Image (tube, rainbow, N blue to C red):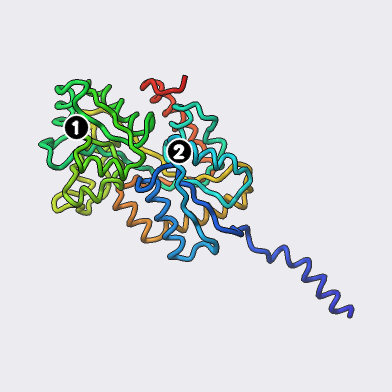
Amino acid sequence: MAASAVAASAALFAAPAAQAAWEPAKPVEFIVPAGTGGGADQMARLIQGIVVKHNLMKQPLVVVNKSGGAGAEGFLDVKNAKGDPHKIVVTLSNLFTTPMATGVPFNWRDMTPVSMMALDNFVLWVNAETPYQSAKQYLDAVKAGGPSKFKMGGTGSKQEDQILTVGLEKATGGKFIYVPFKGGGEVAVQLVGKHIDSSVNNPIEAVAQWRAGQLRPLCVFDDKRMPYPGKITDKQSWQDIPTCKEAGVPTDYTMLRGIFMPPGVSKEQVDYYTALLKKVRETPEWKDYMEKGAFNQTSMEGEQFSAWLGKAEQNHRELMKEAGFLAK
């Protein structure tokens, strides 16, 4: 009797040490603060697929699109889910632009940063049937055409695509009619159908149409060319696309692809998702996606990520102010 009591007592004290680290106890909601088909949606669904294929989570990861109010619907949902570790959100730079443009009561500090997965490039695209072979040719035509001739399609209003469009106008003296759509997938379809004249879609949002010979990339808005030499079409790779600076357009901009959690979650819960996402980035499927989408493969977490977010927020504030997009 005494021996069994001692054994039971020993087991009781051993139990906490043997306990596994925190992991989700029910399905995890993966919020996409944008429409279906765009870059954020594609990334979330890829992560979901990798998690399932490699059995990285015991619980399901369920993608939910909440695109209302330029993504404010998704961000506010996460902000208001204080302490809920069964909710994560993929962010774009609308993390900064949406609250600045709309005045919606939200800031990235209202959530818990988990991981920067990558930075996304922007490319100036035209329909492949147009005569424009270079960014300079196209932008010269826009300038010559006057203020109500050329339509630039983009995702949302007063967000990254429109900020870039204003930057282009300021750099070249041209003037676009900016036409907003719900997501990058729709923008690409509209450009193929010639309902707009150009777009500044991310590579992943227009690669299928480029491969099919329907769209033509003119330049990339980064300070160096994309480092991917594999051919996408018969003749061109991502690396073959000149920078916009090479084309005489001094405008550059990259976009965050990050993962956040609600406020008030524990370090142990953040650590779980940090480790999970690190495993995702190590898979061949992720590496293939990075190359196909011509991403800038910068990743970071912890204090380094928070410091980057602070600087990016300030940069967006300056860009938005210059464009006249800050909420009054």
**Is residue 52 among what the camera can see?**
yes
Instruction: Give coordinates of residue 300: x percent, y percent.
Output: 47, 45
Residue 118 location, x and y as percent? 40, 46
* Secondary structure type for disc 1: loop
Determine the image quadrant of residue 35. Answer: top left
Residue 303, placed above or below residue 321: below
Residue 194 position in % (x across, y down): 19, 38
Q: In front here: 3 or 148? A: 148
Instruction: Count every numbered label the image shows and give the total.
Output: 2
Residue 247: assigned label: 1
The N terminus lies in quadrant: bottom right
Which circle's residue, 2 or 1, is located before the other in the chain? Answer: 2
Q: Provide the residue designation for mark 2.
A: 68
Label 2, secondary structure: give it: loop
Of tags 2 and 1, which is closer to the observer?
A: 2
User: What residue do we see at 14% from left, 50% from top?
Assistant: 235
